[in-house]
Amino acid sequence: MRCFDAFVTKLDPRGAIVYSTYLGGATSDEGFGIAVDAAGSAYVTGNTDSADFPTRNAVQSANRSRPCRGDTPCPLDVFVTKLSPNGRAIEYSTYLGGTGTDTSGAIAVDRAGNAYLTGTTRSSDFPVRSARQDAIGGTDCGPTPETPCLDAFVTKLSASGRALSYSTYLGGKNSERGGDIAVDARGRAHVTGATQSTDFPTVRAVQPSSDNSSCRSEPPAEELCDDAFVSGFSASGRTLTFSTYLGGNGQDQGLGIAVDRRGGIHVAGTTDSRTFPTRNALQPRLGGAVDAFAARLSAGGGRLVTSSFLGSAKNERANAIALGADGRPILAGRTESPAFPSSRAAQGTLAGDYDAFVTRLR
């Protein structure tokens, strides 16, 4: 079986390569997220099953996942690597994980060079420190008894990479996945993802309980759908300042998050819920089988300001959201709808089964 490596590439404003490098060990490594600080250093995260992934100044110098057994997939650990601005040197590089499978979701960096990560873990011994939740939330997710469920995790690494400032599980009695993370000017992490738990922790919630009624009422009766969640942490990581479900009667996932200069929280993802909560919507109804969504919560997360479907007759998904210099949200994702809403388009027609889309909202 052929293995693969992560790679990191920097382009200048004209699209020319400034640097480009492999990043990995002897088996398989996958890059999943990247952030850049004011000095131009790149912070990269992803997944690895390599026992010799390059480490330096590491908070965790070894892959803690159990060895591969037979034909089953190898358990993964997360990696976090900081590259110098010219890409020639690793400033720090570390594993992050326990003895189960741990996968990366995203990375953000603050003004002081601290890195913030979210992702998904099935490790009951995932490294925790100054945790809001110090144990995995669910412990019976089969197929064998007492198999841990998936939980999201939220971790802050010090600027040197040598220490965990805090690290915590985030979840309830069923499964969660960490989708994306953003940090505001005061060093407070904001996280979005997906949860199947009816006891996911909520604080000052826009939506205090899970819906997913169609999943519970239609066969198979035991099927669980996801609701998106949006959660905000204090700067210490010990406290949730707000936490809310965001979803309707079907499947909803939070995949992208950004925080604007005023503290407004912008979230993007995917939904097939006809009852997904909308407010001041550009598109108030589900367009096809699955739509993208874009929502904005007030600073502090206490109020839903805007929320809208985005899609047409087939399937869409928004994978990421960013804010332009003017503060307006920009979404990126994929669509298979020939009539996906477009304006001033560089490419106005669908070219394949799925096309990427980039949409700027007012």
Image (cartoon, rainbow, N blue to C red):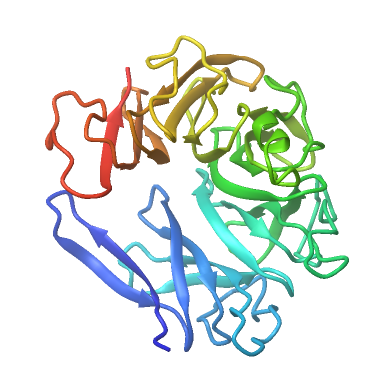
Provide residue 96's location: percent of width, then percent of height: 64, 68
Q: Is residue 176 above or below residue 217?
A: below
Answer yes or no: is residue 264 visible: no
Task: Judge left or right: residue 105 versus residue 217.
Answer: left
Residue occupying image coordinates x 58% and y 72%: 94
Provide residue 42's location: percent of width, then percent of height: 40, 59
Q: Which residue of the protein is positioned furthest toward the top in this rendering?
A: 280
Front position in the image: 257 or 185: 257
Front position in the image: 317 or 267: 317
Task: Judge left or right: residue 192 versus residue 164.
Answer: left
Provide residue 302's location: percent of width, then percent of height: 67, 17
Answer yes or no: is residue 358 visible: yes
Provide residue 143's location: percent of width, then percent of height: 78, 67
Q: Is residue 224 above or below residue 268?
A: below
The number of numbered discs placed on residues in the rendered structure image is 0
Q: Is residue 42 above or below residue 47?
A: above
The answer to which image quadrant residue 161 occupies is bottom right
Residue occupying image coordinates x 22% and y 57%: 11
Task: Judge left or right: residue 215 versus residue 345.
Answer: right
On the rendered image, what quadrant is the C terminus found in?
top left
Residue occupying image coordinates x 53% and y 69%: 47
On the rendered image, what quadrant is the N terminus found in?
bottom left
Residue occupying image coordinates x 39% and y 58%: 41
The answer to which image quadrant residue 150 occupies is bottom right
Front position in the image: 109 or 32: 32
